[in-house]
Image: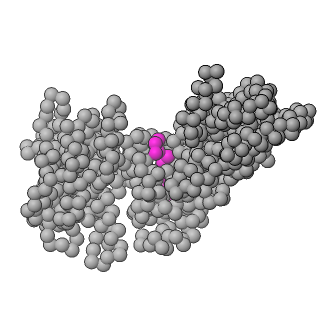
Amino acid sequence: MSNKQFKAESKRVLDLMINSIYTNKEIFLRELISNASDAMDKLYFRSLTDNTINVKREDLKIKIDIDKENRTLTITDNGCGMNEEELDKNLGTIAKSGSLKFKKENEKAENVDIIGQFGVGFYSAFMVSDFVKVESRTPNSEKAYCWSSKGVEGYKIEECTKDDIGTKITLHIKEDSEEENYSQFLDSYKIQDIIKKYSDYIHYPIQMEVEHKKKKEGTENEYETVKELETINSMIPIWKKDKKKVTEEEYDNFFKDKFHDYEKPLKVIHTSVEGQYKYTSLLYIPAHLPYDYYTKDYEKGLQLYANGVLIMEKCEDLLPDYFGFVKGLVDSEDLSLNISREMLQHDRQLRVIAKNIENKIRTELEKMLKEDREKYEQFFKTFGLQLKYGTYNDYGVNKEKLQDLLLFYSSTEKKLVTLKEYVERMKEEQKVIYYASGETVDKIDLLPQVELLKDKGYEVLYLTDNVDEFVLQVLMNYDVKTFQNACSENLDLDSEEEKEELKKANEENKEMFKTMKEDLNNEVQDIRFTHRLKNHPVCLTSEGVISVEMEKTLNAMPNSQGIKAQTVLEINEKHPIANKLKELYKEDKEKLKNYTKILYAQARLIEGLNIENPTEISNLVCEILSK
């Protein structure tokens, strides 16, 4: 026998369970039944390739026993069981960290269900019981082991006697208190209701003794109470039911249970396909990102079933990366039960199913965009970044599939719009789609270049995600309209007369600009006058492929190589500062140097860039202000 202590976080989560504030305590049974179902899935799956395991699927079942006198509730399965090491690993340590952080972030939320979300499903038993005993035996083993615990004090594992394989979990239900009626979990009808509510779809029989009144033999009006073993669940997988007969609550409960989520899904996609290949799919778009979505630990993929039997937990080939957030399953009658992962990669049927699923998800998203804009915008705020990555990745091979699902903030509409909506509103003579990048909508809105475009009546798309500009570069154009950065040096809004006037002014002052450029140690590609600024004195524009915002993004990446955008310092030719610079060039080149540095620093600040020498700039500003 070994007495052990829970690890620190496990102990804290157990304390959370024991002193649970959750009103929905009944979900403990859902979790334990799901674990039992998984154990039987694993045993049956192993039997397909292990000749030493002789099991028939119809013999697998879950049994529930209630002992009101001793206040115990027992859940028994004849699945794969656990050995001593597995009991210690699976029941002695929380599977994943993060549950406490999640709890703290949601302290004010009502009925928040974190059970299962972080691998703590089994620990939910302590919400309703003060003692838990787990007896388990694995196939091909004569030894059985018992794990037991009263909670945070720790647990012990010892050898025990168990005649058959599988796991038996016995819960000693807590005594009632003023706040909680724990005895309800010893009521046969209550337990039946919980099973039907959460676990009706489990494809193994969930059996328990149910009391019935029967007429006594040889009597007319006398009845006796008898107990009969009955199967409580329908055992029809939810995805095989008629869609018209499945309620929204049933879909939601299945999602929460099967995929360990605490919130109902944003969208359910249930389809049955007949034809060359016959299959059923049940797909869910979650309401939020999985906590580990952008980590190496996240595994995309759909559960794969062959005629109702799970053959692969995560079949990643069924989903493209840009729809990797989708949860769900596919069940095909044509797949072999013992098909291997290697065979799946070359299976034509699987490729066809994957293509159909991809098209179905995209079609449903397009439908949501058209018919329920509010819900689609909610979806896009959560998963839009992933669609953008999908557009950009693999050199834009999927861009045409995704471009109409993208949304960008509009300066005109003051909300998210599609590229199609922008193009439909374009001026007749407008040839390009204007955009500007920045950290926030408010900061972009204040850019001098954007102000000019808005004054001329042009709509501007505001790009606030780091990947946005890369996406537009990959798209290259939309509906034959190219994309134009408002902060690019080749923004062309002047009339021919204005262009000639500006060209003349720049030619007349080229020597002054040359001096100013040298004063900046050639930090900029060029300095020139511009008409693109309304009331602002200066701005930075970029030349070439890399913009200022792209420079910031690329240099924020690991192992960045200090990539720099080729920038141009543009000065408003109609601003009083232009005449001041001309005056200083003639009379005081040292002061011109100071003005140049200040103007360049100002332009960098407007673009959200750092100033390399803030102390020098501060001193120069104070020097000028003091005179």
Specify start and end residues of the magenta stretch as a single range: 279-289
In percent of width and height, residue 286 lies at 47, 45
Q: Main secondary structure of the magenta part?
A: strand
Q: Nearer the viewer, residue 78 or 513?
A: 513
Residue 525 shows in this picture: yes
How many numbered markers are drawn? 0
Q: Nearer the viewer, residue 602 or 454?
A: 602
Q: Quadrant of the C terminus?
A: top right
Q: Quadrant of the N terminus?
A: bottom left
Q: Nearer the viewer, residue 399 or 237?
A: 399
Is 280 magenta? The answer is yes
In percent of width and height, residue 205 lies at 29, 56
Q: Quick check: 392 left or right of 456?
A: left
In percent of width and height, residue 252 lies at 42, 42
537 above or below 299?
A: above
Which of the colour schemes (rainbow, by chain, secondary structure, one colour) is used? one colour
Instruction: Give the residue drawn at x 24%, y 44%.
Output: 13
